[in-house]
Amino acid sequence: MHLTAEERSWLAGDAGPALRRAAEIVVALGKIYGAERLIPVRSVQISGVSYRNLGPAGLDFLQRWAAESAQVRVPTTLNPAAMDLVNWRRQGFDPDFAEKQQAVIDAFARMGVGEGTPVPTCTPYLVGNVPTLGEHVAWAESSAVSYANSVLGARTNREGGPGALAAALLGRTGAYGLHLDENRCATLRVKVQAVPETIADYSALGAVIGKAAGQHVPFFVGLSLTRDDPLWREKLKALGAAMAATGAVALYHVADVTPEARAGDVLAAGHEALTINALLPGYAMLSDPGNAVDLVWVGCPHASLPEIARITERVAGQRLTVPLWITCARPVLEVATAQGHAATLEAAGARLIADACMAIAPAQTLGFDTVATPSAKGAFYLRNLAGVAAHFGPLERCLGAAIKGRRTA
Ligand code: F3S
């Protein structure tokens, strides 16, 4: 691999042990994936933030880097934590867990993440970190990676936690995978004959395609989606998140909508083809039997302001019998509060939760066994990571469950 003089000096340890370790990680990953050089990145998004997943060893790892005065070189954001960093008591977290989770955030803050005030979210593109067409970034969270590549046309592989942290300290990543033109062509033509309408429908579609597509780059034709749809970004956010959860899709194109599909023919020679006739299997594959619901969770990926406004409108004046938690980035929560949505939601028995993700929270310890969600990705990880039962269904049905206290057909 060709390295610049500065990169070689990092590897030699001239800039201290933290940069040497970071360079070793980035160069080793580059060699594994065949990179010929490193490239500068404009921003980094780091995963591995929940103390539930990191445990004492992960916290110790981060604190050692922070103690060596390691500092990020490019704007860097964090994935969600397990809890709302301000209102964790209301969520039911115990002080010992909260202290450890805060220590994780503090370690990242000392390294300069978020300029010392990290904003944990899986939707950095909703809070000002918006890479542009062709820009190289190093993001870690799979739905954010999918959104950056597909909807924004930026270029990122799906970084692992240590790889992303190392990339942030260097401001570099290896030039391989989706950073290269030749890997951005579609390898699977997907003809959609079912008609997805709602955001949850796009999530169900993504669940089906992700399972079938694996690591392919899908090119969707036949979708009626246009950029005139006020929720077109939210629909693609849901589609990409689901494909990255049930499969490993990190880039997709939608005819006439996503930037690289608008720029010309993105189909690779010798591509495969797939036709999708129904969305129901997407909902069914991520729903457990039974009607009980003890939490309704919306905001996977983190909810945008238009999504929060829709839910507020729907539950205004109602009295929910099951808690409804809407996860979002803290700056989004602040605007939603200023616009009166938070007060309306609270009056109905719903709550905006910042910083957090229920899939990486200790859901059972918080008293939840069955969670309804309009997100395929949320349902996938609730079942496979949080270890609770899930009902994946359209938003209307999830809100109905919050109102009636049970899932209905
Ligand atoms: Fe975000 Fe958690 Fe969903 S990280 S995409 S809310 S599983």
Image: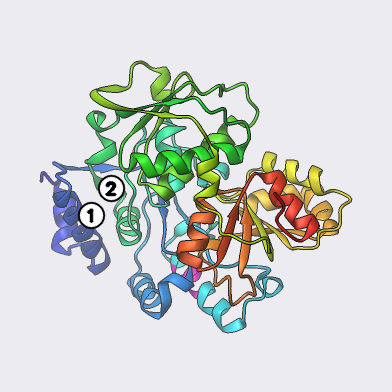
Q: Is 104 contained in the magenta span?
A: yes
Q: Position of residue 171 (x, y in %)?
A: 31, 49
Q: Identify the residue under disc 2.
A: 172
Q: Secondary structure at mark 1?
A: helix
Q: Position of residue 71 (x, y in %)?
A: 37, 61
Residue 15 seen in render: no
Picture layout, residue 173 above or below residue 407: above
Q: Residue at x 63, y 70 (%)?
A: 368
Q: Residue at x 48, y 59 (%)?
A: 381
Disc 1: CA contacts within 10 A as few (<14), some (14-19) or many (>=20):
many
Mark identifier at residue 351: none
Q: Residue at x 84, y 56 (%)?
A: 348
Q: Secondary structure at mark 2?
A: strand
Q: Position of residue 182 (x, y in %)?
A: 22, 29
Q: Identify the residue under disc 1.
A: 26
Q: Do the CB atoms of the residues marked 2 and 1 lie less than 8 Å apart?
A: yes
